[in-house]
Amino acid sequence: MLKELWEQAEERLAQTMPASTQVWLKNTHFESESDDTITLSFASSYYRDAFKRHCLDQSLNVLEDLTDKDIKINLVISSAPQVNANIEEKKITHLSEKKKAVNETLNKDYTFDNFIVGENNLFACNVAKVISTNPGISFNPCLIYGGVGLGKTHLIQAIGNYIYDHNPKMKVIYVTAETFTNELIQAISTKAGNAKFKNKYRTADVLLIDDIHFIADKESTQEEIFHTFNDLTERNKQIVFTCDRPLTELRGVNERLITRFRKGANVDLQPPQYETRMAIALKKCKDLNFKISQDVLEYICMNIKTNVRDLEGALTTLYSFSELVGREITKEIAAEHIKNFIPTEMIKNTEVTIDQIISQSASYFNVSTFDIRGKSRNKNVSLARHIAMYLSSVLTNLSLTEIGKYFDSKDHTTVSYAINKIKSIEESDESIRKATEAIREKLKK
Ligand code: ADP
Ligand code: MG
């Protein structure tokens, strides 16, 4: 019932909105409804925030016009990306013509050929290639870690695809830690299920587990991974896994498992430098057949520095915009879109110093600035430190390396991890949001 109402609203909105705003409307997906609430889902926070900014008020107004009821709109991020279905479809058919589907756990788009190598990922990529050509021999197990959107899934899948293509007899299994956990929960209810589960993973020649941080505080999963791990490595079977942070920062995981993870190779992925971002952007545009001028592309890559996923998101959006309105993307249009991409709080304020940020964060959490800068692992101190790092990246012009220098032996990886962590929980965690807001408020004064 609300679904029909929303469809009507969409139609009306499409008639009244400028084409540039319609892009955001097109990127919504009707998820579900309850009494008086319509839930719309988005492929990423980028699309959700843009919708919120450009379409939400108008949508509510239209709904109000269409019905007497007070309808609310709830915005969520979907796990299955819906964006630009047309583009994705086009891309998929195009790809499927060229390649045959092989291993169903692997995505054929994630290959070494498609992976742009820069200083930020060179070592990780080389290790991944060595593993691919000689699975189980060196770098076993291997951990690839790095922040969100930096290419962990791409790289671990590239290993899988390479091995699968070159040794089709090898059993290559890619699984996310989340799927592994869910399968385990299903399996343990019956004896047969349990045996089947064990058999599935322990007969792998190459086991690729993505996002291992998911197993924190999940004891049965850790236990199962521990035994699978021992079983496979004893027989020189290759294991690769990814994590969104270095092992030293991984909490809630059994020490004996950490010890296993620590063996072998630990390689990290860093945010790409400008030149790498440019190379990735050029490739992405080529894949999409997106004609965009060099200086506009440079402008985009200068501004979107966070990670590859954001960069791809911006390009895909600009592409769908240009397709929709049939216009070439100018710097002004790009600037307008990028403004949506970078939260206003990211607009740098050079008047705040990192010392002030550290001092205000310390005072808010009631810890000393000495502790914040130091190595204490105390929960409160760590949180204060992470928030100070995050605010430093948001409110000053300092690079991650420069920020790291204000903290004892904190290199840019740790800083990047802290920033991503706070960024990802700021919205959902009330206490974190309160803290950042209060500290910002103090800094304003
Ligand atoms: P993560 O798993 O670390 O969050 P992903 O592997 O999902 O990140 O990468 C996000 C997107 O960026 C994917 O579409 C991926 O193909 C792309 N990507 C990341 N790194 C590179 C790279 N070096 N070259 C080309 N594409 C990349
Ligand atoms: Mg991933």
Image (spheres, helix red, strand yellow):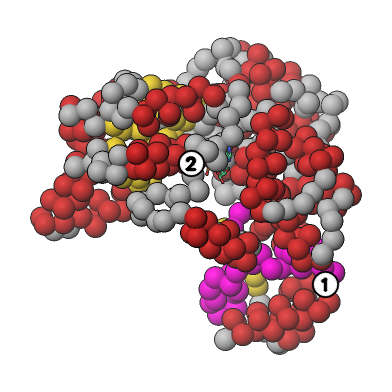
Q: Closest to the observer: 120 or 104? A: 104
Label 1 sits on what residue type? Answer: Met
Label 1 crowd bin: few (<14), some (14–19), many (20+), radius 10 Å: some
Q: How many marks?
A: 2
Q: CA distance from mark 2 to mark 1?
A: 40 Å
Q: Is residue 214 above or below residue 416?
A: below
> The N terminus is located in which quarter?
bottom right
The numbered dot on residue 442 is none
**Which residue is under mark 2?**
111
Mark 2 vs mark 1: which is more N-terminal?
1
- Report the residue at 59% width, 63% height from top: 90
- Report the residue at 62% width, 66% height from top: 86
- Check if residue 91 falls in the magenta segment: no
- Report the residue at 78% width, 60% height from top: 322
Is there any visible trace of residue 427 in the rendered image? yes
Q: Picture quarter containing residue 68? A: bottom right
Q: Secondary structure at mark 1?
A: loop
Bounds of the magenta segment: 17-44
- Report the residue at 72% width, 63% height from top: 24
* x and y percentages locating residue 92 in the rendered image: 53, 60
The numbered dot on residue 17 is 1
Q: Picture quarter containing residue 408? A: top right
**Nearest-to-viewer mark from 2 and 1:** 2
